[in-house]
Image (spheres, rainbow, N blue to C red):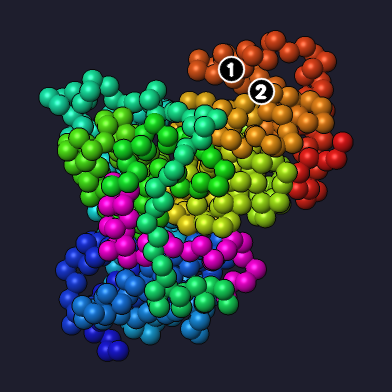
Amino acid sequence: MPSGLRHLVVILGDQLNRDSQAFDDFDATTDRVWMAERRGESEHVWSHKARTALFLSAMRHFAASLRDDGIPLSYTRITDAGPDDLVAHLAEALRTLRPRRVVLVKPGEERLRERIRAAAGDCGVDYVERPDRHFLVSTDDFATWAKGKTQLRMEHFYRWMRQRLGVLMDAGKPVGGRWNFDAENRKSFGKQGPGWLPPPRAFAPDATTREALDDVAECFPDHPGSLDAFDWPVTRDDARLALADFLDRRLAAFGQWQDAMWTGEPWLYHARLSSSMNLRLISPREVVDAALERFARGEASLASVEGFVRQVIGWREFVRGVYWLAPKKLLASNALKANAPLPDFYWTGDTDMACLKEAIGQTLRTGYAHHIQRLMVTGNFAMLLGVEPRLVHEWYLAIYVDAVEWVEVPNTLGMSQFADGGRMVSKPYAASGRYIQRMSDYCDGCRYDPSKATGDDACPFTTLYWDFLHRHRERFRHHPRAALQWRSLDRLSDPQIAAIREKAATLRAAWATGGQGEPAP
C-alpha cells in the first residue's frame, strides 16, 4: 500500500450504516476502510456467544456489501493472525498503511474512543472524529438541554424531543391531549395468559452467519450462552423485514402488554429491533416514521404507538445523552454503597427462583430479555441483594445481544441499580415478589411465596425488598417520591424487621460463597 493513503476510515462493529458520516467525502482512490474482529472485544466482558456471533455476522455482511460497491477494505477475521486487542491491531495497520488521518464516527464507549485517539497520536496520525448522524439528537444538543439540571428526567427530555421532531404533535400540543399513556400500558395477562402469540420473523443463518457461528463456537467454547437458537437480523434488509413484521403483527398489542411477562414466551409483542438499531442496520427515524404511519392508517392505537415511540426517541436517545455527559463518573458510581458479589446463577440460570430461572435461562438461550425482565427481575434482584454495580454492568454488557456501552451503562447503573444516586431516575425501582406475581405467571408453582418475607418458603425478592427498605431508610424516608413506599416499614414490628434482616443475611452469605439458591431450611 503506497504511503499516499489519505484516510483510513475505521468502521466499528456497531457502526454498520452506509449513510455514516465516516463515509462523507470518501474517495476510493485515496482512502481505505478498516474493519477487524478481535478476541479482546469479546473478552473485555465475558460475552454471550450469540452477542459475539451477531457482531461478527453483521460485520461480515457489511464488509461484503462494501466490497461489492468497490470500496477498498482491509478486514481481519477473528481467526486471522494479529494482536487480540482491537486497538493494538489498529496501531499495526496505522504503522503499515501510514495514512495521513484516521477517520471514524464517535465510538459507543469512552474506553475505546480514548484508546483509538491515543494510538493515532502514538503513530503520528491525525485523529478525525465525526458525529453520529444515526441518532436524533447530538451529544452537544443533549448537553445543552441538560445544562444546569441537577436531575435528568426522561419524561422532560421526551416532551422536548416530541416538540423538536414534531412527533405526535398537533398545533404544539400532544396528540390525544396527553404526553404518555403509561396507565394503559401496564397490563398483565392475568390467569388466562396471553393466548396465541404471533411469533416474530426468524432469520435462518445463511452461509456467512454459519461461518460466524462456527468461529464463535471454536474461539469461545467456555463463554456463556447458546448458539442453537440464533436467528437475529444481520443485514439492513433483514432489519427492514423485522420492522415490517413487528408493525404487521405485534405493534397493535405492544402498548398494553409491554410490561407483561410469561413463562416460555420471550418475545410476546416486543419488536426485537434494538440489536438492529444498535448495530445501525436500521435508523430510529425510519422506525418511528413507520410506526407513525400505522397510527395514521388506523392500524394501531395511540397508546401502543406512543408507548413504542417513547422507547425509541425517549429512552434510547436519553440514555445515550446521559452516558456521554460523564461516562467515567457514571461507570464508577455506587451511591448505595453496594458491594456484594454477583451470584453464580446469573451465568448459569441454575436457581430455584422461578422468575430468575426463566429470565436468565431465556437470556442464555437467546441473548434477549425484554425491558421489564431486565429492570424488575434480574436488575431489581441485584439491587435488592446489594450487588456491586460494576459487576451488574459487566453482566448486562456481556449477556445481551443488543448491549453496547452507551446504552447499557445508563440503563444499568442509572436506572436499574440507582448507582448514580438519583441523577437519572427519581427513586429506586425496588419491588417485592408481589410485583412479579402480578405481572407474570412466574410465581405459579414456584416453591417460594411472594407474600412472605420470612420462613422456609419466603420469597427471596420479598425478604430482600424489606431488607433493602430498612437498610436505606434514612436516605429515602423523607424523599418526596419514595417516602410513601418507605413508610410501609412502619407497619412492621421490631421483631419482624429483625427476622427479615437475619433471613436476608443468610441469603447473602449463601450467594457470596457461590450458592445457587436459598440455603436449605
Most distant residue in the left direction: 171
Whether label 1 touches label 2, CB < 8 Å: yes
Residue 157 is drawn in which quadrant?
top left
Q: Is residue 235 magenta?
A: yes
Q: Amino acid at mark 2?
A: Leu
- Report x, y in % for residue 515: 78, 48
Q: Please report the residue visible at 49 percent of the width from the left and 32 percent of the height from the top.
A: 189
Q: Which residues are magenta?
A: 219-247
Q: Please report the residue visible at 61 percent of the width from the left and 46 percent of the height from the top.
A: 358
Element marked by disc 1: helix
Element marked by disc 2: helix
Q: Taking 214 as reference, is 174 left or right?
A: left
Instruction: Tell me: residue 118, above or below residue 467.
Output: below
Q: Which residue is mark 1?
A: 485
Instruction: Tell me: residue 88, above or below residue 346.
Output: below
- Report x, y in % for residue 196: 44, 43
Q: Using the rendered image of the protein, determine whether residue 93 is visible from the camera's viewpoint.
A: yes
Q: Which residue is mark 2?
A: 469
- Report x, y in % for residue 72: 26, 81
Q: Residues within 10 Å of mark 1 (few under 14, many from 20)?
A: some
Q: Amino acid at mark 1?
A: Gln
